[in-house]
Image (cartoon, rainbow, N blue to C red):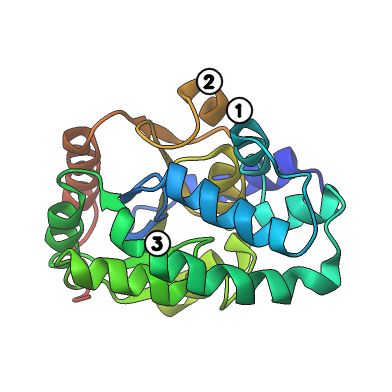
Amino acid sequence: MKPVRTMIRNARLRRAKTSKPPLLMFDFDGVVADSFEVFYEEFTGAVQLLGWDKLNSRESLLKLMEGNPLAGLVKMGFPVWRLKQLGEQFAPRIEAANARIAPFAGMPELLSELSAAHPVYVITSNQTRAVELFLEKHGVSGVLEVVGADKEASKVKKIRKVRKKHPGLQGWYFGDTKGDMIEAGIAGATTVAIAWGWHPVATLEEGKPDHIVHDQDALRALIRDVATKAPASPAP
């Protein structure tokens, strides 16, 4: 298997030659939802109910997010055969905790605005139904699909699958962790690091993002610039 850095570099070289309208793919936690404390409480609680206590600090969870979190759990010693049980434990916990999670101010409106002009997906390590309920609750309209960890653990596979649905567009992935940048880069997406999320900018830079945005105005301007330079986009 090729080293991760080589896979990201090759993917970046391939997409650098394209000038296509954007396909927008957003992470959820740390990008749309201000959810770190609730996610930490519920995820570590689900793990501990299964008798595993190595994920026991905020720092350990943030370290886990430097790669694929489920793969990282296995590397830490969590049994592969218990991953399904973990999903079953976590799903109802995070759905119930949904009422305690708030969106970052302006993000529901921004997602709805972008969805009116471009195909928009949410690709997340969270649970699909929990995210769908959150978007409904906060009035987000137009998102074509939420693709959570219960559908597929690997963001690389999820991003590639969504990109195949829109062959005439260039995929852009907006994430807030080093792991997001690595997986989305391998999947051939243009990567945008969100600076208001879980990982600090220094950690995000280790994932070699194509862009870093520090606020929603910068995110909006980046997409507007890309859409203006590209040919007309097909209807979402």
Q: Residue at x 29, y 66 (%)?
A: 134
Percent coordinates x, y for residue 72 in the rendering: 75, 50
Residue 35 as seen in the image, left or right of residue 52: left
Q: CA distance from mark 2 to mark 3?
A: 30 Å
Residue 58 as seen in the image, left or right of residue 18: right
Q: Which residue is mark 3?
A: 97
Residue situated in front as seen by the camera: 199 or 231 = 199
Q: Which residue is mark 1?
A: 206
Percent coordinates x, y for residue 79 in the rendering: 86, 64
Question: Considering only vertical position in the picture, is 122 above or below 15?
Answer: below
Percent coordinates x, y for residue 138 in the rendering: 18, 63
Q: Quadrant of the C terminus?
A: bottom left
Question: Considering only vertical position in the picture, is 211 above or below 48?
Answer: above
Kind of residue at disc 3 = Ala
Instruction: Mark 3 vs mark 1: give the one in front.
Output: 3
Q: CA distance from mark 2 to mark 1?
A: 7 Å
Q: CA distance from mark 3 to mark 1?
A: 31 Å
Kind of residue at disc 2 = Ala
Percent coordinates x, y for residue 50 in the rendering: 76, 65
The disc at residue 202 is: 2
The answer to which image quadrant residue 170 occupies is: bottom left
